Image (cartoon, grey):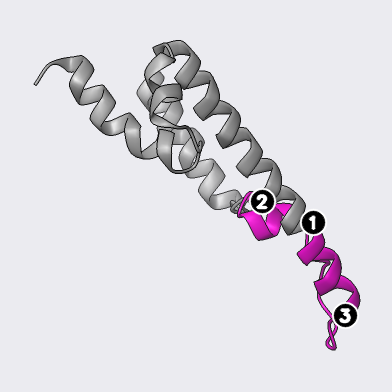
Amino acid sequence: MTPVAQWIEKAAPVAYGPLGLKPWEFGRLTFGEFYELAEGYHWRTKQEQIMTAGFVASIINTCTSRDLKKPVTVDMLLGRERQEKQKVTQDEARTDMKELLASVG
């Protein structure tokens, strides 16, 4: 199978599914045009996720019956919230510094 045929085999489900292209539309696209359409679809789905998470966060924050420690955010719902930094004790910091200085010379 040629590389172009392999690409068509992998791209066809995306073209006919999420992008909603007809066979003659898919056949007329260049590789670059198809890539741009796929990128646009990906961008739209991310924006829809963000918008939906915003609606859900506002519902959770206003309609919950229990007190939350901190309000729910879009980043929390999408799993983009920063992880808390690990606290380093003074002894660990001294040990790390000694090891670093020993390795440097």
Q: Is residue 74 left or right of residue 97?
A: right
Q: Answer above or below: position of 54 versus 31.
A: below
Q: Which residue appears farthest toward the front when viewing the image?
A: 24
Q: Of 64 and 20, which appears nearest the observer?
A: 20
Q: Residue at x 65, y 49 (%)?
A: 82
Q: Of 24 and 80, which appears nearest the observer?
A: 24
- Gap between marks 2 and 3, in whole Å? 21 Å
Q: Is residue 79 left or right of residue 34?
A: right
Q: Is residue 8 left or right of residue 105?
A: left
How many numbered dots are placed on residues in this image?
3
Q: Nearer the viewer, mark 2 or mark 3?
A: 2
Q: Can you say which quadrant of the picture contains the C terminus?
A: top left
- Gap between marks 1 and 3, in whole Å? 14 Å
Q: Which residue is mark 1?
A: 54
Q: Answer above or below: position of 15 versus 68.
A: above
Q: Amino acid at mark 3?
A: Cys
Q: Answer above or below: position of 4 versus 102.
A: above
Q: Which residue is mark 2?
A: 49
Give the residues drawn in magenta, as a range.
55-82
Q: Of 14 and 78, which appears nearest the observer?
A: 14
Q: Are marks 1 and 2 in contact (CB under 8 Å)?
A: no
Residue 56 at what x, y percent from top left? Answer: 77, 66
- Gap between marks 1 and 2, in whole Å? 9 Å
Residue 48 at what x, y percent from top left? Answer: 69, 48
Q: Can you say which quadrant of the picture contains the N terminus?
A: top left
Residue 19 at what x, y percent from top left? Answer: 51, 36
